[in-house]
Amino acid sequence: MEERVSGWKMFAGVMLMIVGFMNVFDGLVAITQSNYISRNTGGLLPLTNNVKNWGWVELILGVIVVLAAFGVLSGATWARVVGVLVASVNLMFQFAYLGHYPFWSFTLIIIDILVIYGLAAHGGHELEEV
């Protein structure tokens, strides 16, 4: 019998993929355009004030989120746990970045909350065979 993915699990996997690619994009921008970001954001970054270091962390986090998204979309049970963990870490990361780009970070925070809800509350429910 072929395993089918529930609606919330599919939503969570697709949203993890989008968030991961947005983090990769944002990390690459921070690495390559660090002077532009430093000049236009103002304020301090948590733990480090080096925008390139922050960008590398965001790039690596984005790649991990994309890999977790592939796992969730494949239907692997371990991927639900990893998906919740990476969405939680990304949520905290974006919360720390909220002062620099509020709209961008707030959007990713909302998506992370929905992903956590989808994987935690509905991730184990598979669709019934019709």
Image (spheres, helix red, strand yellow):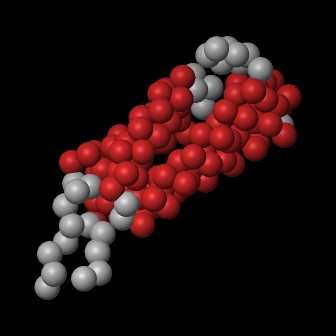
Q: Is residue 8 left or right of residue 125?
A: right
Across and down, in percent, residue 56 comes to: 73, 35
Residue occupying the point 76% across, 42% down: 29
Residue occupying the point 16% across, 81% down: 129
Q: How many marks?
A: 0
Q: Is residue 48 left or right of residue 65?
A: right
Residue occupying the point 47% across, 40% down: 86
Across and down, in percent, residue 117 comes to: 28, 45
Say above or below: 12 vs 91.
below
Question: Residue 37 appears in which quarter of the rendering?
Answer: top right
Q: 99 or 96: which is nearer to us? A: 96
Say above or below: 128 vs 97.
below
Q: Quadrant of the C terminus?
A: bottom left
Q: 105 or 10: which is nearer to us? A: 10
Question: Residue 73 appears in which quarter of the rendering?
Answer: bottom left
**In this view of the protein, can residue 97 be seen by the observer?**
yes
**In this view of the protein, can residue 109 be seen by the observer?**
no
Q: Is residue 130 left or right of residue 31?
A: left
Q: Quadrant of the N terminus?
A: bottom left
Across and down, in percent, residue 11 comes to: 36, 60
Across and down, in percent, residue 60 comes to: 66, 41
Q: 67 or 56: which is nearer to us? A: 67
Say above or below: 72 vs 110.
below
Residue occupying the point 41% across, 58% down: 72
